[in-house]
């Protein structure tokens, strides 16, 4: 009954000519490698977890995609000066201008940390590469001055994050302790 639906021998020969034969080590029986439940939950069949995250030694991408005003902008992290919270939005201050994003500042703080950004206030994240000066205030807060003259207040809550602004500190132990 189904003979008329089977392939014609000439077609089988043409298909065999087009497809190169598989090496013997790549052909496996389906039942020879049973799938375990762990392989579906992010672990390999041997029980070791599968890690899809980039290796820590790898550099993050050179650009960040940002959705603003119905467009997707590609921003270089070095071009971003600071991020400021403004109610339900954040203002992404760049050297060439600013854009408003509908995102929480905590999400941006986590996303920008690999690029050298440091949160210095509950509403401010700065590019550590652009910090020129830190001045202590009498209230226990710090004044952070960036290249270009823009100043931000670093609150006492985020004082420990100021240590991340430089790899080494000379004569600053009592300053930030």
Image: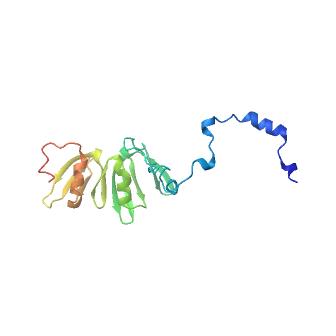
The image shows residue 139 at horizontal and vertical percentages of 14, 61
- Res. 115 visible in picture: yes
The image shows residue 128 at horizontal and vertical percentages of 28, 47
Q: Is residue 137 left or right of residue 161?
A: left
Identify which residue, 70 or 36, lies in the foreground.
36
- Res. 147 visible in picture: no
The image shows residue 112 at horizontal and vertical percentages of 36, 51
Which quarter of the rendered picture does the C terminus lie within? Answer: bottom left
Which quarter of the picture shows residue 142?
bottom left
Colour approach in the figure: rainbow
Q: Residue at x 22, y 61 (%)?
A: 157
Q: Is residue 153 left or right of residue 173?
A: right
Q: Residue at x 33, y 58 (%)?
A: 84
Total numbered labels placed on residues in the image: 0
Q: Is residue 153 left or right of residue 58?
A: left
As displayed, is residue 119 above or below residue 6? below
Which quarter of the rendered picture does the N terminus lie within? Answer: bottom right
The image shows residue 136 at horizontal and vertical percentages of 15, 54
Which quarter of the picture shows residue 99?
bottom left
| Extreme residue toward the bottom, this view | 87
Identify which residue, 174 or 82, lies in the foreground.
174
Identify which residue, 50 or 171, lies in the foreground.
50
Identify which residue, 113 or 133, lies in the foreground.
113
Q: Residue at x 52, y 56 (%)?
A: 40
């Amino acid at each position: 009954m189904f003979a008329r639906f089977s392939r014609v021998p000439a077609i089988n020969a043409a298909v065999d000519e087009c497809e190169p034969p598989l090496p013997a080590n790549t052909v496996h029986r389906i039942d020879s490698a049973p799938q375990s439940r762990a392989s579906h939950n992010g672990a390999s069949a041997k029980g070791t977890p599968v890690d899809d995250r980039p290796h820590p030694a790898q550099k993050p991408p050179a650009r960040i995609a940002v959705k603003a005003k119905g467009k997707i902008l590609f921003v270089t992290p070095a071009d971003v000066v600071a991020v400021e919270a403004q109610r339900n939005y954040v203002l992404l201050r760049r050297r060439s201008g600013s854009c408003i994003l509908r995102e929480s500042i905590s999400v941006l703080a986590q996303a920008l940390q690999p690029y050298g950004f440091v949160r210095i206030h509950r509403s401010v994240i700065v590019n550590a590469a652009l910090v020129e000066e830190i001045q202590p205030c009498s209230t226990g807060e710090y004044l952070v001055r960036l290249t270009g003259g823009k100043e931000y207040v670093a609150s006492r809550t985020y004082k420990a994050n100021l240590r991340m602004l430089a790899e080494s500190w000379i004569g600053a132990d009592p300053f930030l302790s």
